Image (cartoon, rainbow, N blue to C red):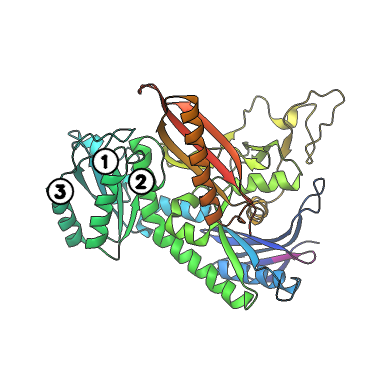
Amino acid sequence: MPPALLEEGSECFQHTGPSLVGAQLRHDGATAAVVRPSAGAASPPQVLLVERATGPGALERVLTAAATAALATATAGPAARPVSVVLDVGPHLEHLLQHPGSLDPVAVVRVAPRPSTDPALARHPSALLEALVSRRWVVPGGHDLLGRELRLLDRAALAAAVADLAAASPRCVAVVAAGSAGQPVHERTVADAVQAALPGARISAAHDFGGHGSAAREATVIADAALRGAVDAVVDRAEAVLRRRAGGRGAELRLCRGDGGSLSAERARAAPVLVLGSGQGPAVLGAAQLAVADGCRVLLPAADGGHLVGGVRNGLALVRPLVVGEPAAELVVPSVALDRARPSSPAADRPDRPDRTGRAGAPGAQARVPDVVADGELDELACVGAALARPLSWLDEIAAIGSADDLAAVQRAAVRRATAVATANGAEPGSADVVEVSTVAVPYSRAGTVRVRVRVGGVGR
């Protein structure tokens, strides 16, 4: 049945009774889908309804239609669970970053042993991120990777910087201290002083995100601070719709993470950079889920006619650090890894190319990761991926170990922290499991210095 136009800029495609809601917000419109999860390991999820809208109020219109449809077939009674709604705002936020005039400017406070003498080093190398910065202050202090103090925190310089900030009264402040991933005391002291002087300011601190590399850590807190107002506004709009439509039944709103998982609306408000970069990531997962492929290579159509390739393993997308802008600036938060397919070996030219279900079609084809070629609308696939997104958490930390027992203890502690974060992100208590743990030596550092990355996923409430 083709979509039926309901009104200018809106369309609805309904099949049968709904279950979960996934939605995507873009700068030019919004899409929502109602999805019934698969009934078994061999069956795909069902797309029950797709609603699209453009123009002002697009998000409200699609969420209203989807929530109404979800409630129409929901199980009634006192034990009825809230309607699950997962919203992908990545495309909307990426558009805002490209138009910095629509975001609040960010004041940046660096804590470093000494200020940069070269003007090029005094600013961020990414023009996209530097356009968000109104002014910088440098407070002497900081630590090395392992938390050893490189210089005492200069209290007089801190007081002068705070006085300047109080006079400028910025709404958004980013604080990044050398070595705060290993020892955040200087960064916390600066952030607390700024918050005391500017009680209404939104403050982002780099130690909240972990990671490695001063440029990547500064880029992360600049983007996080700049996007807080925008994410607050979107969450407020979505929650207002769901309060009106869900009534006493209630609705649980989560947002898509950049790595293809989900997190609670409260966590998204506190750390909006975690939802940046979601964009096409949910579409990768949506295509894999509709193909009933827990492990595959997903090919998404690119705007120029080629393909973008993303990998899925154990039902979760492969990730790498988020990159924004041109020239590329790396952040410390994860995003779904997407690469351009090589023109010399497109999937369509392979004689053993799998069909949409991931099964190889040629006799005697060697076992390999199956290809899934996305043949639906990308916004619909993204909504499917969003509706079924698992609450995830990601930790990226530096530690010092002296033995195998030390390594095991560091990993256990990191897994406990990641599990707590996944539960706070909306995972059912007790459902979180370890998706990935990796430990690598940090080059050009003392023996025993390692970088620990932990990814934990759970089942949504």
Task: Please tell me which of labels 3 and 2 falls first in the chain.
Answer: 3
Quarter occupied by the C terminus = bottom right
Q: Extreme right residue here?
A: 363
Q: Which residues are magenta?
A: 12-18
Q: Position of residue 358 (x, y in %)?
A: 78, 37
Mark 3 residue element: helix
Give the labeled residue for mark 1: 123
The amino acid sitting under disc 2 is Ala
Q: Position of residue 87 (x, y in %)?
A: 57, 59
Q: Position of residue 71 (x, y in %)?
A: 70, 72
As for residue 276 lying within the magenta part, the answer is no
Give the labeled residue for mark 2: 206
Closer to viewer: mark 2 or mark 1:
2
Visible residue check, residue 326 = no
Quarter occupied by the N terminus = bottom right
Q: Position of residue 92 (x, y in %)?
A: 50, 56
Closer to viewer: mark 3 or mark 1:
3
User: Vertical placement of 49 versus 422: above or below?
Assistant: below
Q: Residues within 10 Å of mark 2 (few under 14, many from 20)?
A: many
Give the labeled residue for mark 3: 155
| Residue at point 32%, 56% (across, down) | 203
| Residue 337, numbered label | none
The answer to whether 147 appears left or right of 375 in the picture is left
Instruction: Say if mark 3 contacts mark 1, CB within 8 Å.
Output: no
Q: Nearer the viewer, residue 431 or 238?
A: 431
User: Vertical placement of 23 versus 145: above or below?
Assistant: below
Mark 2 residue element: helix
